[in-house]
Image (cartoon, grey):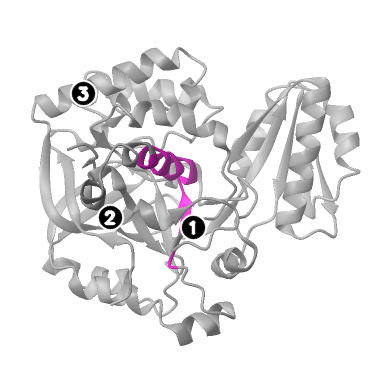
Amino acid sequence: MKEIAIRKDKILLPKVDDMQAWACIACDQFTSEKDYWDKLQKDVCGKRTTLDLTLPEIYLEDNADARIKKINENIKNYLTDGVFTSYGDGFILTVRKTPFVERRIGLMAAIDLEKYEYSKKSDSLIRATEGTIEERIPPRLKIRKDADVEFPHVMVLFDDEKREITEDLYARRETFKKIYDFTLNMGGGSIEGYYIEDTDAIMQKFSSLLDEDRLTKKYGRVDNFLFAVGDGNHSLATAKTHWNNVKATLNDDEKQNHPARYALVELVNIYDEGIYFEPIYRYVFGVDAKEFVKGLMQVDGGIMRIYDGSERMCNGENDLPTGIRAVDEYIKCYLEKNGGSVDYVHGESNLKKLVDERRDAVGILFEKLDKSDLFKYVSKNGAFPRKTFSMGEGVEKRYYLEGRRITK
């Protein structure tokens, strides 16, 4: 069997009465919508919750060091208080329903960070799909370096056009032990989980995706490219950075199975019917909207729309990645010269609502990426520009739910 860089592991779940309060959405969502986080905080107050164990990015400029210290204290207290139960050495099949899709199937497993690189031109088995901003790693690293447990929101894609892995497991889900089934808070839909102990056949199917004839037909060459990080690029890059730091303190034997070498992720087939790509829009604010738009109109952003209270269509010649790079460079230069800020927003309605709330704001909307092109593009060209696409709307992002020990 070929090297596939995944393994079964002990997965932690909470022993709590209210799973709806426990599971909270990924930290990098709703970064300009404080009302979302205020309501969530109110709803889960006084209950065991992953909101106590993670740092939403909206608070990065709000006493972050004190928040991080408290997060690590909470993790230790949860462990001491026996909040977690361990499901030993297996996978978890996840079945997610959202307001937009009836079903999305995933598989919780640990991936080997030694087989993951996030550089743009990586040829590793596990690769980033978008450019990584090194400056976004340190705040996350402050949490992880002192944390005993990780709670992942990372979703990693695999390219199984025959739908023979997770779809087969879903068809046989009644044969597995159901370990959770509940409604997610804040309109996130619902989720079910099934524990899978016998993983050998699953491993073999992943290995078959690396058949040389198959790779040549799909990518035009034998490119050992098995997994692409779909959501959580920076969180996984943080896990990699942390592992490199830990690894430097270990001998060769200790490096082989140290828990920090692995990261828990959700593996999802890119052909799953619940996976669809949405553009990530640019929300620029604190600017002279008229002057900003005037300059933006001179940029070839490919096919894009500009919204400043009214909408205008721009039909440039650049392809999607090149257009996004051009627009991002314009935004960067404009803000450096004139001041202002940029945020990255999921959902057209969310973006337009934010722009409509103020006169000094502009929204930039890009076209969708065809998901079937993702692996072939990354194989040939490397990672897309950062914040090119999102897998679905904000409320569909992975919720923090399962955990895993990353210290001995």
| SS of the residue under disc 3 | loop
Q: How far apart are labels 3 and 2 at the CA level?
A: 25 Å
* Callout 1 amino acid: Arg
Residue 2 vs residue 35, the one in the foreground: 2
Query: Residue 202 in the image: x percent, y percent?
Result: 25, 72
Which residue is label 2 attached to?
A: 108
Contact? badges 1 and 3 (CB < 8 Å): no
Q: Quadrant of residue 70?
A: top left
Q: Is residue 402 visible?
A: no
Between disc 1 and disc 3, whose residue precedes? Answer: 3
Q: Is residue 50 above or below residue 175?
A: above
* Callout 3 amino acid: Lys
| SS of the residue under disc 2 | strand
Disc 1 versus disc 2: nearer the observer: 1
| Dot 1 crowding, Cα within 10 Å, few <14, some 14–19, many 20+ | many
Q: What residue do we see at 63% from left, 60% from top?
A: 369
Magenta residue check for 243: yes
Residue 315 placement, left or right of 168: right
Which residue is label 3 attached to?
A: 47
Q: How far apart are labels 1 and 3 at the CA level?
A: 37 Å
Which residue is label 1 attached to?
A: 127
| SS of the residue under disc 1 | strand
Could you tell me which quadrant the C terminus lies in?
top left
Between disc 1 and disc 2, whose residue precedes? Answer: 2
* Callout 2 amino acid: Met
Residue 176 placement, left or right of 362: left
The magenta stretch is: 226-244
